[in-house]
Amino acid sequence: MDQAFPPHTVVTMPALSPTMTSGNIGTWQKAAGDVIAPGDVLVEIETDKAQMDFEFQEDGVLAKVLKDSGEKDVAVGNPIAVMVEEGTDVAAFESFTLDDAGGEKAPPAKESGEEAAESSEPADSGSQTSPSTLPKGEPKESAPESLGSESSGGRLQTSLEREPSASPSAKALALERGVPIKKVKGTGPGGRITKQDIEKYKPEISAAPSAPAGSAAPTYEDIPASSMRKTIANRLQQSMNQNPHYFVAATVSVTKLLKLRQALNSSADGKYKLSVNDFLIKASAVACKKVPAVNSSWREIDGQVVIRQHNTVDVSVAVATPIGLMTPIVKGVESLGLSSISAQIKDLGKRARDGKLKPEEYQGGTFTVSNMGMNAAIDRFTAVINPPQAGILAVGTTKKVAIPSSAEEGNGVEWDDQVVVTGSFDHKVVDGAVGGEWIREFKKVVENPLEMLL
């Protein structure tokens, strides 16, 4: 490669979070020769969490696209485009190749322990997307005057935060069904892709040998897994393989809690509406402060194994979204009131379902609550730990149970509202007796809910 190119900057695949090692190239919003202003969307990128927009933050001109739309598993730090200053001869870059940009590099290898630690919490150091953070290999000769850039010139923003070429509901449905949105022809205004277009999409069927006469048509449909679904599968499998789970269940009376909730909501004048889950999240924080070993995580730092005990309780709340399970975080729950917890959960839950969460709003957390109580068929269930956390609480639905009457006279019965909760704990961090102690403290505060108000 002896050809000299005018001064230029190589744009690399950016990293949205420490969990992202590669991404898929979506629709390019700019073509070679287009002028880029700060804030312009350069290209859509499907990450391990959602479909995002790569918003460039520098002036310039797009000289060459190195990775076309539809390219899969492009490693973070690999070249995807070339930018030049205005006035530069863009035609000079027609022959520019990946090799001229320094070549492609393999995704960074991770230690198994590090990978587990990154699934719910970012690394201590900032995530960089420049080639310097990738594994060192044989140096490759680069073109003269090439400015190997980091992707700090741009930032990632959810596609739903701007007017896309597809409606928000269409994007969500496409991710849920694994439909390649670039192959869908839009019928909306200006070619905009609608939800109906996604529902009517039929994947192209490659030519295959004709089936023997009389043979039945396939009785199944293969749905491509999205990047987020692959990430969820990898993380849950990793959690079960690397974290020795054990489970502790208890039946908890919520009769007093329901009466307190009704009284507080009645006097709220519409300012808030507390849910049972708000109380349970607060109760889990109280239990974590009383049994801090559960509010801890297993870490490997510079080759040394430590158990990090957290001073604040940041509760991850499991939320089902069209593209998979998300766990937005309510931070510092131990110091929040019930109305504040309720407001944050409603806001985070809505933005999680809309795909508008910022990375810092779902990465981290010290304990998780997963509540399926809204499904009356679920008496109880067990949940998979969200590493590097050491515990997660699974909450079933509320049932009315007949219990002996507390009245002094007679041998009658009364009805008690009860719920079964199951704690999953990482035995590396939390011994069995400690997990049992945490459940006892949780049960105590739920059955005496006025303690939450102290």
Image (cartoon, rainbow, N blue to C red):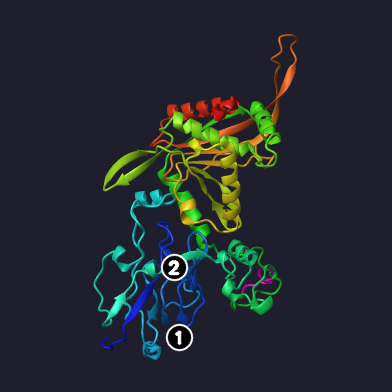
Question: In the image, which residues are magenta?
Answer: 197-203
As drawn, 67 above or below 250: below
Q: Residue at x 25, y 87 (%)?
A: 2
Whether the magenta-drawn stretch holds residue 212 is answered as no
Q: Amino acid at mark 1?
A: Gly
Give the residue at mark 2.
Answer: 73
User: Which is more N-terminal, label 1 or label 2?
Assistant: 1
Q: Amino acid at mark 2?
A: Asp
Q: In this rendering, would 65 be left or right of 406? A: left
**Looking at this view, is 152 or 47 the one in front?**
152
**Looking at this view, is 437 or 360 the one in front?**
360
CA separation in Å, label 2 and label 1: 26 Å
How far across and how far down the image is residue 187, in percent?
Answer: 69, 77
The N terminus: image quadrant: bottom left
- Residue 141 figure quarter: bottom left
- Residue 197 figure quarter: bottom right
Q: Residues within 10 Å of mark 2 (few under 14, many from 20)?
A: some
Under circle 1, the secondary element is loop
**Looking at this view, is 35 or 430 the one in front?**
35
Under circle 2, the secondary element is loop
Q: Residue at x 49, y 73 (%)?
A: 40
Which circle, 2 or 1, is nearer the viewer?
1
Tag shown at residue 33: 1
As drawn, 11 above or below 395: below
